Image (cartoon, grey):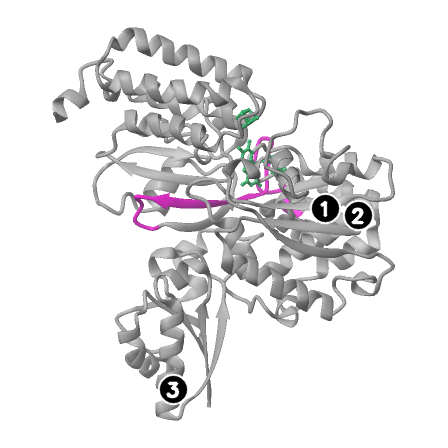
Amino acid sequence: MTIRLYIPKDAAAVAVGADEVATAVLAEAGRRGLDVELVRTGSRGLLWLEPMVEVATSAGRVAYGPVSVSDVASLLDAATNDGGAHTLRQGVAEELPWLKRQTRLTFVRCGVVDPESVDDYRAHGGIKGLERALSLGSDAIIDEVLKSGLRGRGGAGFPTGIKWKTVAQAAGPQKYIVCNADEGDSGTFADRMIMEGDPFVLIEGMTIAGIAVGATKGYIYVRSEYPHAIAAMKTAIDAAKKTGLLGARVAGSNHAFDLEVRTGAGAYVCGEETSLLESLEGKRGLVRAKPPLPAHKGLFGKPTVINNVLSFAAIPFILSEGAKAYADFGMGRSRGTMPIQLAGNIKHGGLFEVAFGITLGELIDDVGGGTASGRPVRAVQVGGPLGAYFPRALFDTPFDYEAFTARDGLIGHGGIVVFDDSVDMSKQARFAMEFCAIESCGKCTPCRIGSTRGVETVDKIRAGIETAKNMTVLEDLCNTMKFGSLCALGGFTPYPVMSALKHFPEDFGATPTRLQAAE
Ligand SMILES: Cc1cc2nc3c(=O)[nH]c(=O)nc-3n(C[C@H](O)[C@H](O)[C@H](O)COP(=O)(O)O)c2cc1C
Ligand code: SF4
């Protein structure tokens, strides 16, 4: 009898010992003469249970976790007993409440399939979107994307269909598709999970974009800190070429499309689209002034679609199931689902894909189970290092682009970083300015100089030097950066700073003081 086991090779699982567990499983199976088939998958996203090992049983895939090497012998006993009892047994994976509460449209195969196998991808519903796209043609594909309501998942929330239409209508024989996989936001890892767990969905989404706008070449720009994702994408691209998914005749059609992976050199600002294009062209990652938009004059001066990994990865579902199936989820102008990433001081961190509309409080308290430290949640930062800090009083905010904007926040790439009551928010404000000073590309003065003056001003406030006067200076500085910066790095750094000041004034010595009480 063959026993089939699934162990993630996702970087988060590998970081906590998944490779060692996989090696130990094979060694123990060899000692016992067991016929074990080991499939290395991506992660299902229940990160507190990693390494999570799944065993194929008559009832479905049964999950055990977190598994360490010392558990392997007893785990194999349970595995040979059709997924039997074990202290680490969590139950049938698909039935785990954390997974059952989700609406997985983009992540439906992540953690399920073998990320190196085109056949497995196809067996789990892959390629259907591409086949439909080929039968529809350019205009109808773009119409579907427009009707789906999909907005860019990289941060700005710009409608993807409008971007594609602009590139489709741009003149010129050479156009490009560029995937932004720089994923620099704190607390985010969804792009990485897709690339490591279901890379063909990204390849399929980018290929559909190529067909829609008339581009034959695409690049995936991945941050250098993601070696596992880079390797997984390269392996998947090779497999796609071998099986005719990519190449001169995409899936047997008359469309050509090819993909290459390019690695960044490690700068947050290279996630900004124009800076990314500079970097992709082999130059220093300096932000370009807009216009011209990348859709008109992008990579090597040619019309270019640049989208985030999650934007492209949503496309195959939209094409295979139809725009309405996607747009039926969500609220207001935020249609479909958002892969939310719960990180920081949280009990149950991981990937939670859900329709727009869920509140921040539900996500932190119910889904995430509060802090890992067991102390009260004091603040959460949503949307990366440029996102606002929200206090518990704003936990009724629904996950929706407009609702967050109305509260001076942003959803960004869907990352949430949780802090307990030991956090000092004046330190966090200082960190925001310091981060901007370090990562600034230097092209414009409000960001280049303002961020350094910002660090100095927060330091004065923290030291109790002319607090009221320096608060005014800080606010003034934030306004200059917000309205005078060329890109959102300088333009949005004021959000974490001002939200910390507004919601947690006691940490700045502005009102009866937490700082003094702590001293
Ligand atoms: C400083 C800065 C960093 C950014 N980093 C990323 C990033 O890591 N990944 C990403 O997809 N978008 C990032 N963006 C947003 C991109 O400029 C751009 O809006 C996005 O790639 C467009 O794709 P989308 O429409 O699919 O979201 C960043 C923007 C700024 C200003
Ligand atoms: S805001 Fe900062 S990162 Fe953006 S262009 Fe200006 S200096 Fe460069």
Q: Is residue 14 visible?
A: yes
Q: What residue is at 35 percent from the left and 34 percent from the top?
A: 380
Which structural element holds mark 1? strand
Disc 1 under 8 Å from ligand 1? The reply is: no
Task: Name the amino acid type tagged 2.
Answer: Ala
Task: Name the amino acid type tagged 3.
Answer: Ala
Characterize the local packing of mark 2: few (<14), some (14-19) or many (20 or more) Cα atoms within 10 angstroms. many
| Mark 3 to mark 1 CA distance (whole Å) | 46 Å
Mark on residue 29? 3
Q: Nearer the viewer, mark 3 or mark 1?
A: 1
Where residue 427 sits: x, y (%)? 29, 28
Frontmost residue, 285 versus 222: 285
- Mark 1 vs 2: CB contact within 8 A: yes
Please say if 499 is above or below 205: above
Give the residues in magenta.
325-348
Where residue 55 sits: x, y (%)? 42, 75
Q: Residue furthest front?
A: 283
Disc 2 under 8 Å from ligand 1? The reply is: no
Frontmost residue, 108 versus 51: 51
Q: Give yes or no for residue 302 being in the magenta stretch.
A: no
Asked which quadrant contains residue 115, the reply is bottom right
Mark on residue 215? 2
Characterize the local packing of mark 1: few (<14), some (14-19) or many (20 or more) Cα atoms within 10 angstroms. many
Where residue 256 sits: x, y (%)? 82, 57
Please say if 220 is above or below 421: below
Q: What residue is pinned by disc 1?
A: 177
**Which numbered disc, 3 or 1, marks the residue that appears first in the sequence?**
3
| Mark 1 to mark 2 CA distance (whole Å) | 7 Å
